[in-house]
Image (cartoon, rainbow, N blue to C red):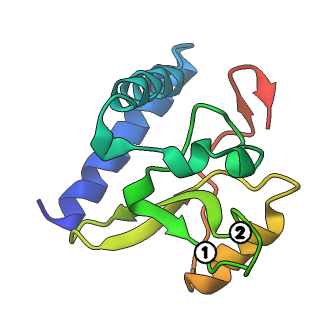
Amino acid sequence: MTLKTVLKNFLNYADTLEAQKKLGKDLYEVDFQKLKALTEELKHDKDYATSEGLKEVNRRKNRYKDILPYDYTRVILSEYPGVPGSDYINANYIKGASGSLAYIASQGPLPNTVVDFWRMIWECEVQVIVMACNEQESGKVK
């Protein structure tokens, strides 16, 4: 499938979600709940381990206790010698249309992870940052 086709399909899907939202049906929330269910299923698959995010030293760096980076594609920061967990950030590399690891998905930084977030941006040479969430989700202001 070409990148043009992928983008066209995505834009068509986004248009559908927006049209349904105007009619009072929040399909964004439906999709989020489907992803949440899939995540629960994957927790039992060793290929999708999240052991780094579950470590006690890293738990306070996770915005949500149930959304953790997969160990095999997580972004690994340079480690500060003698500082346990200093290589951890709640972020994963994502394949692009060509199959290469082209993107990073990350949670919004917490007050205690802002420095780590910007360190990731610097170390990974990120050139574009996109915030892809609503300002309000599930009735909560973010």
Q: Which mark is residue 52?
A: none
Quadrant housing residue 46: top left
Q: Residue pushed farthest left?
A: 1
Q: CA distance from mark 1 to mark 2?
A: 7 Å
Q: The N terminus is located in which quarter?
A: bottom left
The amino acid on which the numbered mark 2 sits, given as a three-letter code, is: Ser
Q: Which mark is residue 86?
A: 2
Q: Nearer the viewer, mark 1 or mark 2?
A: 2
SS at mark 2? loop
Vertical side of 13 occupied by 38: above or below:
above
Q: Sequence-wise, which precedes: disc 1 or disc 2?
A: 1
Q: Secondary structure at mark 1?
A: loop
Closer to the camera, 71 or 124?
Answer: 71
Q: Which residue is mark 1?
A: 77
In the image, residue 139 lies at what x, y percent?
A: 75, 20
Of residues 58 and 134, the one nearer the viewer is 58
Rendered location of residue 132, percent (x, y): 59, 50
Q: Residue furthest right?
A: 111
How far from the left and from the top, in percent, is residue 22?
Answer: 56, 22
**Alpha-carbon neighbours of circle 2 within 10 Å: few (<14), some, or many (≥20)?**
some
